[in-house]
Image (tube, rainbow, N blue to C red):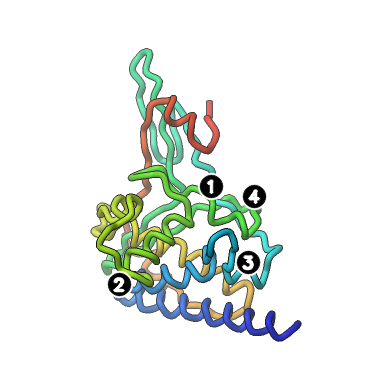
Amino acid sequence: MNNTNSYLKDELRETFKVINTCLSCLYAGETHMYRALAAQLRILLCDRKQRKDNSLIIAVYPKLEISALESINWSPQSSGYFHINQTHGSTNLVAQMPFEITQFVNGLVIADLQLNKSKLIAISEWSKQYVTYSPTELTIEEIIRSVADKGGGAHVDSTMSPALKYIRQKTPTGLTYAQLLIIALARFVNFLGEKIFDHSICKIPDHLFSQEHKKYSLGIVSHHEWAESRIGQIDP
């Protein structure tokens, strides 16, 4: 390994350590750490300048393939946990977004991506996947860049992008979509770092999962023409 590759790999290891530390603080109640997480995710996954991709993990592992997100599948009847009862002649479709929110009894709120572990996608393409079509259409990269570039990750800008304006809406848990989607991405990346570097990471205590907790998923209902124009498949 040449000096440049060795340096970048050390930087990658440090980036994963920062993400792990930020998550540890977040699990202890420091919810503002999502801002620091957004900055590290930007370095890791979507550090682009003009047409050049300087993303750190791509520079170190350009051939890496990881699990894709679950497809956003539109259906006239049901998608995931969501079901619709159609009136005669109705042409609406329903779809569940590929992430899930968990609210624990101690007040901790996290989110996790829903993955298709049987489908691998190149790391260079991974951040181009759509995470949600509600409250607006957003890819992984758009979420990270919105928070990191304008929402306090690396910069604060009084003129919010449309994406940031939408994802600053609050969920039923009290946290915003921005916070929870960054947490979901960071949790996935933290597990990825554990596998790449074989180091221990912070984890939520098992007893919290065994106690009463709430789960939330996001689903949307749309007219079939709008849904069919979006990425994804239509289930019968």
Q: What's the CA distance linking mark 1 and mark 2?
A: 28 Å
Q: Is residue 190 visible?
A: no
Q: Earlier in the sequence, mark 2 or mark 3?
A: 2
Check the image and name the residue furthest to the right.
1
Q: CA distance from mark 3 to mark 4?
A: 19 Å
Residue at 23% x, 59% y: name it.
174
Q: Earlier in the sequence, mark 1 or mark 4?
A: 1
Q: Amino acid at mark 4?
A: Lys
Cα distance, mark 1 to mark 4?
9 Å
Residue 64 location in percent, x, y? 68, 63
Estimate the x, y position of residue 212 in percent, counting from the top left: 31, 60
- Quarter of image, res 8: bottom right
Q: Which residue is mark 3?
A: 58
Note whether residue 68 is visible: yes
Q: Nearer the viewer, residue 33 or 80?
A: 33
Q: Quadrant of residue 200?
A: bottom right
- Which residue is tagged 2? 32
Label 2 is placed on what type of residue? His
The residue labelled by disc 1 is: 70
Nearer-N-terminus badge (3/4):
3
Which amino acid lies under the numbered mark 3 shown in the image of this protein? Ile
**Vertical side of 142 occupied by 224: above or below:** above
Nearer to us in this view, 208 or 137: 137
Dot 2: element: helix
Residue kind at label 1, given as amino acid type: Glu
Image quadrant of residue 220? top left
**Tag 1, which secondary structure?**
loop
Q: Which mark is residue 119?
A: 4
